[in-house]
Image (cartoon, helix red, strand yellow):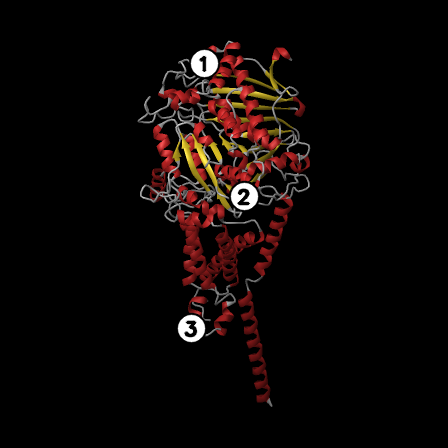
Amino acid sequence: MENNYSKAQLSWLLLLRIFIGWHFLYEGMVKVLNPNWTATAYLMDSQGIFRSMFINMAGNAGLMKYIDFLNEWALVLIGLGLLLGCFARLSSIGGILLLLLYTFSHPALIGVKYMMSFEGSYFLIDKNLIELAALGVLFVFPTARVIGIDRFLDRALPVSFRKFLI
Amino acid sequence: MEKGKTNKTSDQAETRKASAVGRRDVIKTLATVPLLGAMAYGLIKTRKTALFDRDISDVFQLSNKNAVFIKPMAKGRQIRLGLIGFGIRGKQLMRALGFAEPSYMDNLIKAEEANPDDTRYDVFMEQDDLNVVINGVCDIFDKYSESAQLTGSNVNREGTKGKLGPQPKRYRTWQELISADDIDAIVIAAPDHWHGTMTVAAAKAGKHVYCEKPMTWTVPETYMVRQAVRESGIVFQLGHQGRQTACYQKAEEIIKNDLLGHVNLIQVCTNRNTPNGAWVYPIIEGSNPQTIDWKQFEGDPARIMEYTDYMKSFRLERYMGPEERDKFSLERFFRWRCWWDYSTGLSGDLLTHEYDAVNQIMHLGIPDSATSSGGVYFFKDGRTVPDVLQTTFEWPDRNLTMLYSATLASSRNRGKVFMGHDASMEVSNILSITADSNSDRYADKIKKGIIPTDKSFFTYVPGQSKVDAVTSATELYCAQRGLLYTYVDGKRYDTTHLHMREWLECIRQRQTPSCNIDQAFHEAMTAHMGTRAYLEGRTMYWDKDKEEIVRGENV
């Protein structure tokens, strides 16, 4: 595909994509490889306006099995997508949605304390939201069509598929 | 020829160029794939160290078994109950049976509307139907009696606008209630000085008994209760709902598997710091000599004589009264726990919970000796029972001491701790074990840095099954979030509800409840030894052969 980025622009965007992809993939794989991992405690510790919704979810053992499964594999797939540049724009959207859910569960509010506290000090904007904004940048400045499997998919897939996927 | 050659060369160049483009294309397409290898290396390493570090199954053998509770029969018969005493505990027991005052239901609904996190209403509504009916109630305060009738008729668990069922009959005396034909089993939530008398009478009438702790008020009646329960063959359960705490079953297994090493000291405590916690309960409006049957409150003459005889023969008159027994007093009626005339003090009310838990976990039986000290140091409101009390119990045959330490005027949390040579275990609704830095059993693992000594290395959370590894940060975090209920097959239960359910199921299935008459006898005698040691200011001993409390000078 045509590439209108300067070398420097392309390099930094690519680096950002790889870093975020790496982060998601590792977070996901650690959870997948730990059979005892569950988001129950995290959800029970929720604060903010969606608190009771998340706590109710955590209280439902049957539902949690699916939530844990979806969360683990969403992290892995999003991570792989970004790292390999495969359906990279779709992965960016998925990542944004996931991070949005984490933010709803653990908003950085003043006076709110979490059992597993953030390191550092935050008000409204925490690292999750910064990562979320960075994924927004990657969505509007895609690089996988230059470096990544999307370079191949761009040719192989029908035009109508391409817009948000890659 | 020249031209042809040129053409051929340019074709070759084209092909070379195309294949170079193709190669560059492939490289660009798959450029980031090698990164996966780097991550895989990290993941394998992470997993290996995680597993290696945490495995302690060679020195810490524990089953994955979760707590076991008696299973209700599918089509058990309905049990017809009578309730004696509808004060604070009586109301709680009725709720545990599935019957709440309509006004209480209103409050729960309102509380949940105001705060969606307050799920007490849902928990109560989800509580099992125990298939019981309340046929009779008896309280000597009119207001409580009427309230008990209303509560017993709230069969649909609704608020004040709900539809009520038939009202239980109100009995003016507990004797009439016990002899009623349409009552199979009695729940006793009267004050301590009535427990024994009522249990003996109920047993003699062939009625099953759930009695609040402590089992008895005087020493002589303790033998009578045991005899009456044994001879009648009724199903007796003493109200130590701690028996249904999942962690206690796991603690029992840990002791059995010797995972703490030799346990030589057990520390149990009561830490309270409110007037309510110190038994200064509110005086209820509408209470007066017309609405309270004081004569019945005074107690059974035979028991009063046992009490008076004991107090007088050991010159302990200063602990009696100070008011005359027949003098009406609202304070003494609502706050009876503050006077030995009706109460068993800290020993009977709170030490018994702690002792019963330890007896369940370690099967200690009645101690060899008890020594107590303390005094009325904070609540100088005319009470005769101490508000600070220390009692040490000794089991020389087991080479251990249990220290009970209580204050009603400081809520600093001191846990229930079992101290062993290799590790110490703290038990509450969760259980945690911390290795001792001088342990022999764990020495190797401590040296290798696998087992820490500055924090607990094993945490049991009811419902969690994995036990072969050091508790990870997330698991500990989950435990600290306080999963405070007992879980049975994934559903959460209130322990008092489970304790009453066990009693009812034992009646249906002809089994013996966990806090049966033998356990109750241990509990009562142990508490009496602590009380007598305090009152007389000297060590009390237990003569195993004669089954008698004896004094220091006799040994």
Q: Are marks 1 and 2 on the same chain?
A: yes
**Residue A78 vs residue B356, the one in the foreground:** B356
Q: Secondary structure at mark 2?
A: helix
Name the front one of labels 3 and 1: 1
Q: Which residue is mark 2?
A: B475
Say which chain tag 3 marks.
A
Q: Amino acid at mark 2?
A: Glu
Tell me residue B487's x, y (percent). 52, 43
Q: Which residue is mark 1?
A: B320
- Note whether A119 is above or below B530 in the view shown: below
Tell me residue B401's x, y (percent). 61, 23
Q: Secondary structure at mark 3?
A: helix
Locate residue B415 relative to residue B145 in the image: left or right: right
Q: Residue at x 57, y 40 (%)?
A: B460
- Note whether B384 is above or below B155 in the view shown: above
Q: Quadrant of the C terminus of chain B?
A: top right
Residues under labels 1 and 2: Cα distance? 52 Å
